[in-house]
Image (tube, grey):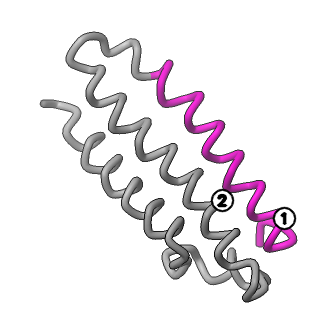
């Protein structure tokens, strides 16, 4: 139970990802969504939300694996972080025309 913060953070991030996938992008910083056109908001929310959800689920999965092996955490979190950030950066460059 020493990794309970990992579970709480994973659930929180996964919920934010689901909210973004459903089209509510208000949880994303205003400067990161400033140039997104109104017709692209659902696609942008889906892409950013998918990346966020991947990261959140990986943290939850890492918490579950700590019961068997703590060394397996990095094999779950690091690849998921790279993939999740890839989705988020893709959305930023495609729909916001840059990171800021």
Total count of labels: 2
Q: Please determine whether, in this image, residue 75 is positioned above or below residue 3.
A: above
* Residue at x 58%, y 77% (from the top left corner): 29
For marks 1 and 2 on the same chain, the one whose residue lies earlier in the sequence: 2
* Residue at x 74%, y 61% (from the top left corner): 91
Dot 1 falls on a residue whose secondary structure is helix
Q: Residues within 10 Å of mark 2 (few under 14, many from 20)?
A: many
* Residue at x 31%, y 51% (from the top left corner): 11
Whether residue 55 is in magenta: the answer is: no
Q: Quadrant location of the C terminus?
A: bottom right
Q: Nearer the viewer, residue 32 or 38?
A: 38
> Do the CB atoms of the residues marked 1 and 2 lie less than 8 Å apart?
yes
Residue under pointer 2: 47
Residue under pointer 1: 94
- Real-space CA distance between mark 1 and mark 2, rounded to the nearest whole angstrom: 10 Å
Among the 4 quarters of the image, the one containing residue 83 = top right
Q: Nearer the viewer, residue 61 or 72?
A: 61
Region rendered in magenta:
74-100
Q: Please determine whether, in this image, residue 16 is positioned above or below residue 50.
A: below
Residue 73, how many percent across, how many down?
40, 22
Residue 94, how many percent across, how many down?
84, 65
* Residue at x 35%, y 47% (from the top left corner): 10
Q: Please determine whether, in this image, residue 44 is positioned above or below residue 51.
A: below
Q: Which residue is farthest left?
A: 1
Left or right, 16 with respect to 99, comes to: left
Dot 2 falls on a residue whose secondary structure is helix
Left or right, 66 with respect to 23, comes to: left
């Amino acid at each position: 139970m020493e990794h309970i913060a990992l579970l709480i953070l994973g659930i929180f991030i996964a919920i934010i990802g689901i909210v973004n996938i459903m089209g509510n992008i208000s949880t994303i910083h205003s400067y990161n969504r400033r140039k997104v056109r109104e017709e692209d908001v659902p696609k942008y929310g889906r892409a950013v939300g998918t990346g966020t959800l991947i990261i959140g689920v990986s943290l939850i999965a890492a918490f579950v694996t700590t019961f068997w092996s703590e060394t397996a955490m990095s094999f779950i979190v690091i690849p998921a972080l790279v993939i999740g950030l890839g989705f988020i950066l893709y959305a930023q460059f495609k729909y916001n025309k840059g990171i800021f």
